[in-house]
Amino acid sequence: MTVEALLDFIAKPESGNDPNIVWAGIKAKHRPPRPLTTMTVQEVLDWQDSIDPLYMSEAAGEWQFMEDTLRGLYREAGVSLRDTFDEATQYRLAYALLRRRGLDDYLEGHITAEAFAQNLSKEWASLPCITVDRNGRAASGQSYYAGDGLNKAHVSREDLLRHVRALKSRPIFSHPMPPAPEPAVIPAEVKEMIEDGRKGWAQSATIRNALKQAIGGPLLAVGAWFAAQPGHVQIGAAVALSAGAAAILWGAWRVISERRRKAHAAEKAARAVDPTPDAAAILSDPRVLAALQALAR
């Protein structure tokens, strides 16, 4: 049996194999604005987040992905927030859940079929638990989440174990899994600019270099000249130097402001592509990269 067959077996009681279905308890006015398979992963997450305070479940798609699960899963599955939440994307996500629940360990003989099936029952509530449910009651065909007023098992323990055990036959896949997208290579100058923008002025290479160029050489020359002048000239020079120092500080402030503006613009562009904490690490749009490189110049 193939992984696809196991996932199809799981999807049938979860959703009737419907990639556009959402939890039945969600009212029509709170349902997605269009079919799930035409929305991006980000749009699905935004919709789930918007109804989260209203319902006990915001499960969506063929394998009934919950918001917290989907938010922590898409990277693991090699999926981008910009990807369409279509059948292929949902399949990739479901396969990642199988692996998270011990598929590799099971195929390599590190855990038993019973242990793997029990793990699956913790992920998909329509599957029966194999040993005990979450309240410690011995398995007798009930869901792992039995008693929560929301979930119950829709297949038998025997059917679940039969599908799990059949995975040990080959092939595992009827067709190869599509490769995960390769992360884009971010130009070094863009990374440096973003990191520099996060530092305080004392740690910033940009600020240190600017102050060195603005102050270093001129200060040495002025110091030598000042020491050679008579007292009344030194007084006038001190006034002029004070004005000069103010101008230098003004220039340094402008450098700081410009540095922070560029860093902010770079991060904003990165988050427009993938609004996550490490968005800059997974940029793939060449237009965004070009814009960031232009900012770095």
Image (cartoon, rainbow, N blue to C red):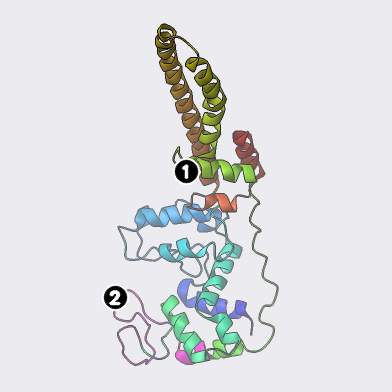
Part of the protein shown in magenta: 133-161
Quarter holding residue 148: bottom left
Placement of the C terminus among the 4 image quadrants:
top right
- On screen, residue 171 versus residue 145, left or right, reads right
Residue at 42% from the left image edge and 62% from the top image edge: 67
Residue at 42% from the left image edge and 85% from the top image edge: 128
The disc, 1 or 2, on the residue closer to the chain's N-terminal end is 2
Q: Secondary structure at mark 2?
A: loop
In the figure, 207 relative to 29: above or below? above
Residue ID for mark 2: 149
Q: Secondary structure at mark 1?
A: helix
Most foreground residue, 221 or 110? 221
Most foreground residue, 103 or 253? 253
- Look at discs 1 and 2 and give the one toward the viewer: 1
Residue lying at the far top of the rendered structure: 232
In the figure, 213 relative to 153: above or below? above
In the figure, 161 relative to 174: above or below? below
Residue type, label 2: Gly
Q: Position of residue 285 (x, y in %)?
A: 63, 46
How packed mark 2 is, by other alpha carbons closer than 10 Å (few <14, some 14-19, many 20 or more), is few
Residue ID for mark 1: 198
Find out whether residue 145 is within the magenta segment. Answer: yes
- On screen, residue 253 versus residue 285, left or right, reads left
Residue 166 seen anywhere in this rendered image of the structure: yes
Q: Position of residue 184 (x, y in %)?
A: 65, 52
